[in-house]
Amino acid sequence: MCAPSVINAVRHSLSRRHFLTAVGGSVGATMVAPISGLAQTKPVRLAKGFRDVYDLTHTFSPKLPVFPAFKPMQIRQRFTIARDGFFANEVTFDEHTGTHLDAPVHFIANGGTADRIAVDRLIAPLAVVSIEARAAKDVDTMVTVDDLLAWEKRYGRLPAGAFVAMHSAWEARISNADRFLNRDAKGTMHAPGFSEAAARFLAQERDIVGAGVDTLSLDAAAAQKFVAHLALLGAGKYGVELLANLARVPSSGATIIVGGPKHEGASGGPVRVFAVA
Amino acid sequence: MCAPSVINAVRHSLSRRHFLTAVGGSVGATMVAPISGLAQTKPVRLAKGFRDVYDLTHTFSPKLPVFPAFKPMQIRQRFTIARDGFFANEVTFDEHTGTHLDAPVHFIANGGTADRIAVDRLIAPLAVVSIEARAAKDVDTMVTVDDLLAWEKRYGRLPAGAFVAMHSAWEARISNADRFLNRDAKGTMHAPGFSEAAARFLAQERDIVGAGVDTLSLDAAAAQKFVAHLALLGAGKYGVELLANLARVPSSGATIIVGGPKHEGASGGPVRVFAVA
């Protein structure tokens, strides 16, 4: 037995500065080696060896690879301390560049916009499904229903309201846009994504808030149609693309915090994404 | 006594979907009446009457008031589902518009940029210091050191790594830019902010990560110089301006999550800010 006051004390201690206490301090110790690229190289310890916060966001810059329909973001200095007393830039971007969110309306007429996603859907249990080993050999590989069932066999059924992220380790290519886009001789891009069946399974057979990838698209790059997008966004889920640092996050048990764009009528846009574990 | 397994079970249950358990379910019950404006009108319950997440972010739109040096943000539709198969906009903004972050480099030559703020400084204990009653009568009122000491007398010393927010209820004016800017006959703006002494006290006598306001500026609008900005940013702290929904957040015990901008070399920029309690 446990006195309620003790449980409350535990809860209280978790609810303040150090509310992000997770299952223990082992996360930092089990990290994989850093990946090259723009992202942070190790998680930051929030407290004394206890809790970690991971930054799942790439630094947003004109150097990041972009999906071919879009142009790289732009930063233009408008004010300087010497001249104006303060320094400030103007920023211009196409919504679907950088680590960014896809709202349903991106593909679905009259679908929900990013600014109106309920905030409780932006903080969610994070399930990381790794297809890294296959992706190293097959650039067209996809997350399958079997991959999702294998995750569940190991970690238990996907929690209600989960966010499911594909980890393909594509991030290792991010400093080289040509390698990231990975076009063949005919100009067709090749990179992993969710299969249509897996996207439908998540949208229909499980209770998720959204899905994410460490590539530029929820769909495999060589897919003829946006089948994974349509399955997920069509079911009112949101997507997050170009996630960083998934190699370092626990496959199960972390919580994702999606600082989604809130400009009016957004089809999506750059996000700041954290995971805490 | 309490068996370790029970504490671990509590921790575990908190570490997943419902990791945001706070001190209890009383927050929602003690909310004040909604304020008019663009922000959400009530906090969302994350779980069964237990935990709340607050959106401290105004919807970012051309209609929001801006500090006079800056232009309103712009949203331009570039792709439509009918023509292109998907809908997407281009967005342009001056960094210091909307609910936004000020990095040290905004005012301090060679100061830190927003993209490099350590992520553990973007999740912090939130202290809300209300000067609402005074601000209703005196549009030039400021947060004083006495206000901070009064907060501490009631709630205890500001926690290490805290984020301190001024709540002046200026948000009630947000749907009317003229009322928000509040210029007098000579064109001087009037709105509350931090006094220089309070900003110095926070920067030097306490261990904070940053400070925020529900107005357009850390400084009172009629201040002749950016004294609060300089005291805070000069000490390496960050600011967040145009915060929403502070009336609804507990004065002590909540945690702020600042989804800060991560574009390269940012002097600041629009943020998505949550509080959890």
Image (cartoon, coloured by chain):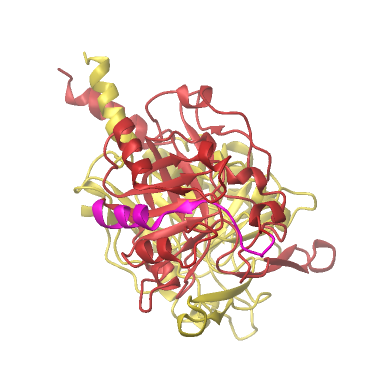
Chain colours: A red, B yellow
Q: Is residue A113 left or right of residue B242?
A: left
- Outermost residue on the front side: it is A185
Residue A71: percent from the left, percent from the top?
Answer: 67, 70
Judge by depth and name the residue closer to the eye, B252 or A146. Answer: A146
Q: Residue at x 62, y 63 (%)?
A: A188
Residue A25: image location, x then y, percent: 45, 23
Residue in the image at 71% along x and 67% along y = A74
Q: Residue furthest left?
A: A1
Q: Kindly tell me whether residue B136 is visible in this rendering.
A: no
Magenta span contains residue B152: no
Q: Is residue B233 left or right of residue B56?
A: right
Is residue A204 covered in magenta?
yes
- Range shown magenta: A185-205
Along the line of sight, which residue is nearer the eye, A72 or A271? A72
Q: Exactly how many numbered labels are in the figure? A: 0
Q: Quadrant of residue A89?
A: bottom right
Q: Is residue B189 visible?
A: yes
